[in-house]
Amino acid sequence: MEVEGNYLTNYLLDCLAARIAERKSSLGVQEAFSVLVTPVETTGVALEEEKLSELTEKIAVDRS
């Protein structure tokens, strides 16, 4: 969880920028950050939202 001021995010971006510079990588800081924080599998929250959406559709059909 992030707090006001984005201290954690800013710290991580600074660390990534330093590592990228050390390795002379062509990968940008934002791109590297995105790769690190984007889930590769469906998260529990996404599954919950999907099931809720399906339930909402069923309720809407039943009311028709």
Image (spheres, rainbow, N blue to C red):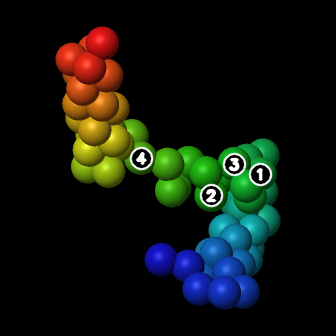
Which tag is nearer the camera, tag 1 or tag 4?
4
Q: Which secondary structure lies at badge 2?
A: helix
Q: Secondary structure at mark 3?
A: helix
Task: Mark 1: give few (<14), some (14-19) or many (20+) Cα within 10 Å.
Answer: few
Mark 2 surroundings within 10 Å by alpha-carbon count, few (fewer than 14), some (14 through 19), many (20 or more): some
- Residue 40, position as x, y percentages in the image: 39, 40
User: Disc 1 or 4, which lies upstream in sequence?
Assistant: 1
Is mark 4 in CB contact (under 8 Å) with mark 2? no
Res. 28 mark:
1
Mark 3 vs 2: CB contact within 8 A = yes
Residue pointed to by mark 3: 31
Instruction: Residue 39: give its label.
Output: 4
Would you say the residues marked 3 and 1 are in contact, meaning their CB atoms lie under 8 Å apart? Answer: yes
Query: Which residue type carries mark 2?
Result: Phe
Q: Amino acid at mark 4?
A: Pro
In the picture of the structure, the residue carrying the numbered disc 2 is: 33
Task: Answer yes or no: is residue 54 visible.
Answer: no
Is residue 64 depicted above or below 7 in this figure? above
* Image position of 33 with respect to 46: above or below: below
* Label whose residue precedes the other's in the sequence (4 or 3): 3
